[in-house]
């Protein structure tokens, strides 16, 4: 298991039971493999909300708002329209990369993306943060699970998670939130 996922499970015990995902089907629909740390994160937790702040998208979630595949399609359309009038972030413009959403920040409009550069394997993808309601993009030279861990522990090197770190860490699974 990825060390950051192991540390997350220690920090925030995962709910059980979890249901395995059909990663081959997910990757076929998405058109690309996904990073191993993300797969392990989903296998450990499923989709849901960490510390009432970071919502991890799940490819198996029946609600399109919390589904990785639906959100990826929707965000690609939104960004394509946006970039007709606003500048494309340098990391994307200079390399011909694309961004693929994997999480969003609750009640903020902000999203977390993988920066998928040409020729890179998914386990080499790094994190892009977009504030959503403004032009700011931040690049974080780390994978998604280490970034999530850094955000939850207050070591992410960004000012966009002012409520974190929380005194006590929580995880609410989609199954619990969406059934409520």
Image (tube, rainbow, N blue to C red):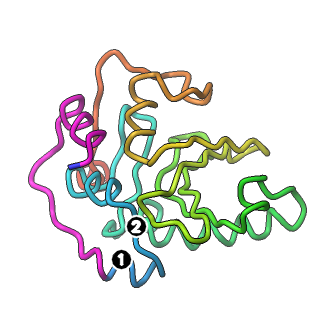
Residue beneath disc 2: 34
| Residue 164 is a magenta residue | no
Q: What numbered label is drawn on residue 110?
A: none
Image: 69 above or below 7:
below
Quadrant hosting residue 150: top left
Give the number of the mark in front: 2 or 1.
2
Q: What numbered label is drawn on residue 26?
A: 1
Taking the view exactly as shown, the residue that stands out farthest to the front is 119
Left or right: 70, with 95 as reference point: left
Labelled pair 2, 1 in contact (Cβ < 8 Å): yes
Provide residue 176's location: percent of width, then percent of height: 24, 49
Taking the spot 62% from the left edge, 25% from the top edge, the residue there is 159
Provide residue 2's location: percent of width, then percent of height: 26, 47
Provide residue 103's location: percent of width, then percent of height: 47, 51
Taking the spot 37% from the left edge, 45% from the top edge, the residue there is 145
Left or right: 19, with 38 as reference point: left
Taking the spot 44% from the left edge, 64% from the top edge, the residue there is 122
Label 2: element kind: loop
Taking the spot 38% from the left edge, 20% from the top edge, the residue there is 166
Q: Earlier in the sequence, mark 2 or mark 1?
A: 1
**160 or 179, nearer to the observer:** 160
Image: 138 above or below 58:
above
Quadrant hosting residue 64: bottom left
Taking the view exactly as shown, the residue that stands out farthest to the top is 167
Taking the view exactly as shown, the residue that stands out farthest to the right is 85
Provide residue 116's location: percent of width, then percent of height: 57, 63
Count of marks placed on residues: 2
Label 1: element kind: helix
Specify start and end residues of the magenta stretch as a single range.
2-24
Task: Classify 10 Å Cα crowding around label 2: few (below 14), some (14-19), many (20 and above).
Answer: many
């Amino acid at each position: 298991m990825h060390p950051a996922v192991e540390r997350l499970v220690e920090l925030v015990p995962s709910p059980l039971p979890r249901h395995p995902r059909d990663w081959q089907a997910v990757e076929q629909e998405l058109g690309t493999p996904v990073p191993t740390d993300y797969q392990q994160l989903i296998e450990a937790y499923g989709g849901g909300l960490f510390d009432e702040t970071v919502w991890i998208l799940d490819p198996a979630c029946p609600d399109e708002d919390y589904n990785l595949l639906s959100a990826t399609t929707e965000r690609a359309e939104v960004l394509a329209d946006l970039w007709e009038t606003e500048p494309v972030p340098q990391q994307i413009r200079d390399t011909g990369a694309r961004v693929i959403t994997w999480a969003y920040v609750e009640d903020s409009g902000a999203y977390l993306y993988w920066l998928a550069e040409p020729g890179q394997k998914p386990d080499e993808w790094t994190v892009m943060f977009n504030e959503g309601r403004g032009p700011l993009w931040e690049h974080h030279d780390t994978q998604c699970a280490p970034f999530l861990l850094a955000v939850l522990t207050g070591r992410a090197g960004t000012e966009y998670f002012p409520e974190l770190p929380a005194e006590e860490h929580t995880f609410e699974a989609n199954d619990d939130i969406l059934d409520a």
